[in-house]
Image (cartoon, rainbow, N blue to C red):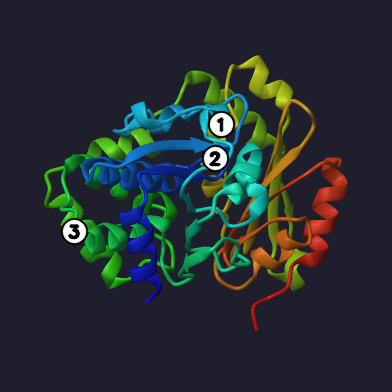
């Protein structure tokens, strides 16, 4: 019934604003652009945006089709006719678009984060879905939109990003079946993977070297399951002209040591804010730990943003780590 209501709302609307979370990743932006391209094909006036200033699309996602539909937050109407939110786990992740999103008479949330409190008019939230792109695929099916290479590129990017290239536990047979349908359109998955994981600036290597040199292993953390953490000061990013978005994959390197169950990376913004990314291999609920710092996410992959010094943040995070019972 809820899907029918959302499809009906879309059918009635002439203008639709599609919003993803601040500092968008492949799932957030891929989902938004796929939906926008599909809705444009149905004759809708669409805008895609996210609430950052400045608004920067990560270089690793510059290949995604449909980016001509992205507008600055200021160009989103003060009272949009209909807003669709993608991969936004909490209201705070709307950034500068929070007020405009909630001014809309209808706000639809499509998400897969278990920590999502369920804001908005309609909530299409499925914590069992490995990516929000899976929900967008279902939306397109219900709208009668057939997959083409542009849509498939966006959706594959979303699914591949949030499954860690199909490595994470949330990946299911249905996930691979969706990937097969997307590949059947003729997209170059090898080129997508290269852009997402195998391309960087030389400066990234310098930042990576510093982050790994600062890495700390705490064997007693998480009831003896172990924690590896590091941080990236803004001065390193500025020195080597590297963006925070460019080092998102650092967490996947830090989670490799067999000795530790949990990994944490802290990335510093120019104003001193620390963005935390955490991962668990399956025995610790990092979403609960991140919630203690005002964040959230999935049980085994979560994050937060906080204004505090590194030592204090690590202490708070460490103190909130609990094994999954």
User: Which quadrant of the view contains residue 97?
Assistant: top right
**Residue 57 drawn at (x, y percent):** 47, 29
**Residue 289 drawn at (x, y percent):** 73, 63
User: Earlier along the polypeptide chain: callout 1 or callout 2?
Assistant: 1
Q: Which mark is residue 144?
A: 3
Query: Local crowd at mark 3 within 10 Å, few (<14), some, or many (≥20)?
Result: few
User: Earlier along the polypeptide chain: callout 3 or callout 2?
Assistant: 3
Q: Nearer the viewer, mark 1 or mark 2?
A: 1
Residue 19 visible (yes or no): yes
For mark 2, what is the residue?
A: 248
Q: Is residue 190 left or right of residue 27?
A: left
**Residue 3 drawn at (x, y percent):** 36, 69
Which residue occupies the foreground of this view, 69 or 211? 69
Which residue occupies the foreground of this view, 77 or 309? 77
For mark 1, what is the residue?
A: 73
What residue is at 35 percent from the left and 26 percent from the top? 68
Q: Is residue 149 left or right of residue 125?
A: left
Give above or below for 21 relative to 47: below
Residue 157 visible (yes or no): no
């Amino acid at each position: 019934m809820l899907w029918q209501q959302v499809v009906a709302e879309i059918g009635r609307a002439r203008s639709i604003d599609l919003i993803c979370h601040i500092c968008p990743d492949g799932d957030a932006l891929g989902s938004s652009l796929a939906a926008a391209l599909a809705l444009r094909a149905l004759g809708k006036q669409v805008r895609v945006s996210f609430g950052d200033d400045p608004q920067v699309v990560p270089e690793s996602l510059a290949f995604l089709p449909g980016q001509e539909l992205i507008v600055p937050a200021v160009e989103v109407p003060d009272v949009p006719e209909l807003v669709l939110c993608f991969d936004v786990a909490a209201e705070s992740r709307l950034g500068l678009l929070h007020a405009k999103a909630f001014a809309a008479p209808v706000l639809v949330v499509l998400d897969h984060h278990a920590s999502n409190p369920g804001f908005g008019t309609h909530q299409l939230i499925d914590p069992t879905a490995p990516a929000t792109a899976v929900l967008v695929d279902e939306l397109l099916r219900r709208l009668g939109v057939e997959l083409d290479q542009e849509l498939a590129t966006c959706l594959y990017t979303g699914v591949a990003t949030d499954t860690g290239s199909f490595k994470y536990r949330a990946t299911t047979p249905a996930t691979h079946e969706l990937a097969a349908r997307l590949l059947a359109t003729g997209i170059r998955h090898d080129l997508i993977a290269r852009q997402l994981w195998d391309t960087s600036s030389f400066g990234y290597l310098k930042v990576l070297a510093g982050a790994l040199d600062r890495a700390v292993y705490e064997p007693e953390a998480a009831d003896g399951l172990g924690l590896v953490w590091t941080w990236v000061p803004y001065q390193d990013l500025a020195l080597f002209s590297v963006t925070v978005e460019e080092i998102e994959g650092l967490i996947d390197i830090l989670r490799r040591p067999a000795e530790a169950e949990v990994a944490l990376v802290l990335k510093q913004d120019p104003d001193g804010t620390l963005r935390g990314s955490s991962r668990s291999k399956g025995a610790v609920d990092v979403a609960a730990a991140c919630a203690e710092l005002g964040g959230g996410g999935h049980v085994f992959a979560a994050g937060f943003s906080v204004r505090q010094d590194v030592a204090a943040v690590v202490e708070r995070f460490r103190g909130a780590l609990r094994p999954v019972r």
